[in-house]
Structures are given as structure tokens and as C-alpha cells.
Amino acid sequence: MPLAVLLVGLTGSGKTTVAKALADHGYIRLSVDEEVHRLHGRYGVDYPEHTYFERERPVVEATRERFIKEIEAGHDVVLDHGLWRRSERDAWRQAASEAGGHPLVVYLPADREELLRRLTERNQREDANALTVTPEALDDFFARFDPPAEDEKAIGYTGDLDELVAALSSARSG
């Protein structure tokens, strides 16, 4: 049964780094942010921040369609998307299960100070994942974020990729 890894974390928590590493282990990596960037440019630079969600919505739907097709084809998939709300995670878990996959939530916790440090570095770049995020925007992100609940059985990412790969392998066989 293919694994469907759902990365959960705020902007700057390390989701893209983990997703790229899992892609090196054979997972199909699907990134909403990179597709929005390809189509519309940089968040807060090439278009106003308040228009992000209207730009993101069709990309999320197209990503969901590909996510389902990859799972149905028997491929392991990692979704590089924040999944901040429990309802979003539930919908992606259901899509994975209905496609014949085994959904697993991987949570990348990070405190505000660490995220601000990472985002300050990232704001200097111009790639798809270099979202310009102010401290005020980050506070808004925290206010809208639902950390995974205990019943979601999330795998907590500690920064050790080998440990995560082992946990995913164990979940596959368990």
C-alpha cells in the first residue's frame, strides 16, 4: 500500500526540506507553493498577499487530483503543503485512503523565534519557497494554525531524517 505523507507545519518549519529529502528516497513530491509561484510569481512581491488564497485554490485542487492519481498508481507521495487546519488534514487523509493509500501525518513543530530567524534568511531569496513573511503575518499564521491532535497520530519530526524514514518504513509494515 503506498504511503501518503502529509506534512504539517507553519511557513518556515522545514516542510520543503523534508519533502525534498523524501523525494530522494523515491517519494513523489507535490508542492502547492512551487506551483503557485510558477503560475503567479512571489507572494507579497509579484501579487498582493491578500490574493494568495484565490490563486492557491485551483492549484490545491489540481494537486489533489495528481495526489490521488499517484497513489492509485501505487506511488508513495509526500505533500509539501502546510495543512494548518484539522479539516484540511482530514480531507487529504480521506482522499489518500479512498485512493488506496496509507495516510501519515508528519508534524514539523517550530517556535516563533526559530521561524522568524529562518524566514529572515528566506526573505532574502527569490525562489518559489521564499515567501516574504513579516512578524505580524507570522503571528496571524500561528493564530490560524491547529497543531495535530493526539488522535491524528502524527509523527513528530525531530530534525533527524533517518529517524523519520525509519518511522515511515515501520508504519508501512505495521
Image: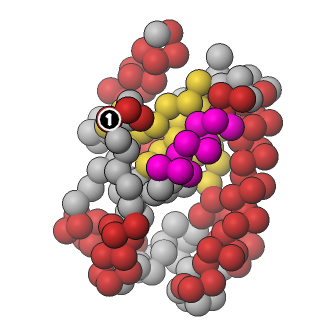
**Is 167 positioned to the left or the right of 73 in the image?**
left
Residue 131: give x, y in percent of width and height: 48, 75
* Quarter of image, res 146: bottom left
Q: How is the image coloured?
A: secondary structure
- Decide if residue 81 is in sight here: yes
* Quarter of image, res 119: bottom left
| First to last magenta residue range | 86-95
Residue 164: give x, y in percent of width and height: 38, 30
Q: From this view, report whether residue 23 is shown above or below residue 42.
A: above
- Decide if residue 22 is in sight here: no
Number of labels in the image equals 1
**Disc 1 marks which amino acid?**
Glu
Q: Could you say which is closer to the camera, residue 20 or residue 105?
A: 105
* Quarter of image, res 149: top left
Q: Could you say which is closer to the camera, residue 23 or residue 146?
A: 146
- Circle 1 packing at 10 Å, graded few (<14), some (14-19), many (20+), is few
Query: Is 99 included in the stretch rendered in magenta?
Result: no
Residue at the spot 48% in from the left edge and 72% down from the top edge: 130
**Is 129 positioned to the left or the right of 30 in the image?**
left
User: Circle 1 is placed at which residue position?
Assistant: 150
Dominant secondary structure of the residues highlighted in magenta in the image: helix
Residue at the spot 41% in from the left edge and 35% down from the top edge: 152
